[in-house]
Image (tube, rainbow, N blue to C red):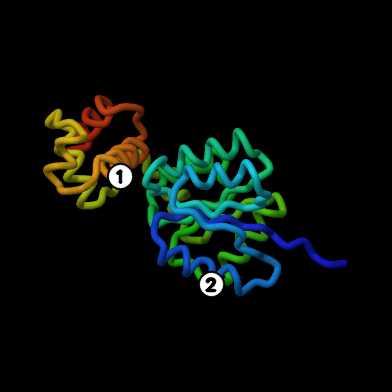
């Protein structure tokens, strides 16, 4: 009996990463990358029309945060399995991805072989977390006071948010788009485990991040 081909959709905001993933996933003859997108809007337009078994999803997208995308997929298309694949190794983001329906999570340094194994496992109704992710989650259980690791750009934006500067002003000051600023703001809120900018600033002060 011929085994079902797993239809995979890749969502990442970097074209080079997408090409690399297509090549890696394509090494397994039982998996087919049927579509690739650089934003969430195009992904959801596709899911309305086409069959997808697994979505390999980056956390950092230009229009909607990957954590929010994961929740929306889980709500509207519960038959579609989500595999998080990102450079973000912060346990708060990983936990929120899982809370929002992700069945697995890997870092982008994963091998082609392990990526294939993960896709197969979550397609079969199981979960898959790399050894590195399992260790990060295990360590976080015993380190509830852990200070989130922020990128240089996130620190810059956090400091400006604390000064009460608006998104357009931040964008102009840092010479980036307002959409990029909003993406960083959402990532900061996710990492700090808060729900709005006021709580974000309060937590940053408490943690001596600003």
In what quadrant of the picture does the N terminus appear? bottom right
Q: Residues within 10 Å of mark 1 (few under 14, many from 20)?
A: some
Q: Earlier in the sequence, mark 1 or mark 2?
A: 2
Count every numbered label the image shows and give the total.
Answer: 2
**What x and y, as percent, mark residue 77?**
64, 39
Disc assigned to residue 2? none
- Picture coordinates of residue 197, whole percent (x, y): 26, 28
Instruction: Say left or right for 168 vs 13.
Output: left
Looking at the image, which is closer to me, 24 or 93? 24
Q: Is residue 172 left or right of residue 88?
A: left
**Side (left or right) of 141 relative to 104:** left
Give the number of the disc on residue 23: 2
Check if mark 1's residue and mark 2's residue have beta carbons within 8 Å: no
Work out which residue is located at the far top of the displayed protein and give it: 198
Dividing the picture into quadrants, the one containing residue 15 is bottom left
Compared with 195, 146 (above or below) is below
The residue to which callout 1 is attached is 148
Under circle 1, the secondary element is loop
* Nearest-to-viewer mark from 1 and 2: 2
Q: CA distance from mark 1 to mark 2?
A: 33 Å
Residue 14 image position (x, y, % from top left):
39, 59
Q: Position of residue 49 (x, y in %)?
A: 65, 44
Residue at coordinates 21% horizontally, 32% vertically from top-left?
Answer: 206
Residue 119, above or below 174:
below
Q: Residues within 10 Å of mark 2 (few under 14, many from 20)?
A: few
Mark 2 element type: helix
Determine if residue 204 is in view: yes
Residue 145 visible in image = no
Q: Quadrant of the C terminus?
A: top left
Q: Residue placed at 43% from the left, 66% from the top? A: 109
- Residue at image point 53% right, 72% down: 23
Residue most extreme to the right: 1
């Amino acid at each position: 009996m011929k085994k079902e081909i797993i239809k995979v959709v890749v969502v990442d905001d970097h074209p080079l990463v997408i090409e690399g993933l297509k090549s890696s996933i394509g090494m397994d003859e039982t998996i087919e990358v049927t579509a690739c997108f650089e934003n969430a809007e195009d992904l959801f337009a596709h899911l309305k029309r086409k069959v997808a078994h697994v979505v390999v999803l980056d956390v950092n997208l230009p229009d909607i945060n990957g954590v929010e995308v994961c929740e929306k997929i889980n709500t509207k298309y519960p038959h579609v399995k989500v595999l998080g694949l990102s450079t973000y190794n912060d346990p708060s983001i990983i936990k929120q991805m899982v809370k929002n329906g992700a069945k697995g999570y890997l870092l982008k340094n994963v091998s082609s072989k392990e990526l294939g194994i993960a896709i197969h496992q979550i397609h079969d109704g199981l979960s898959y977390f790399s050894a590195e992710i399992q260790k990060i989650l295990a360590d976080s259980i015993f380190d509830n006071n852990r200070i989130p690791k922020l990128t240089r750009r996130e620190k810059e934006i956090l400091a400006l948010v604390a000064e009460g500067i608006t998104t357009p002003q931040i964008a102009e000051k840092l010479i980036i788009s307002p959409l990029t600023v909003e993406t960083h703001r959402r990532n900061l809120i996710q990492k700090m485990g808060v729900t709005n900018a006021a709580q974000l600033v309060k937590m940053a002060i408490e943690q001596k991040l600003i």
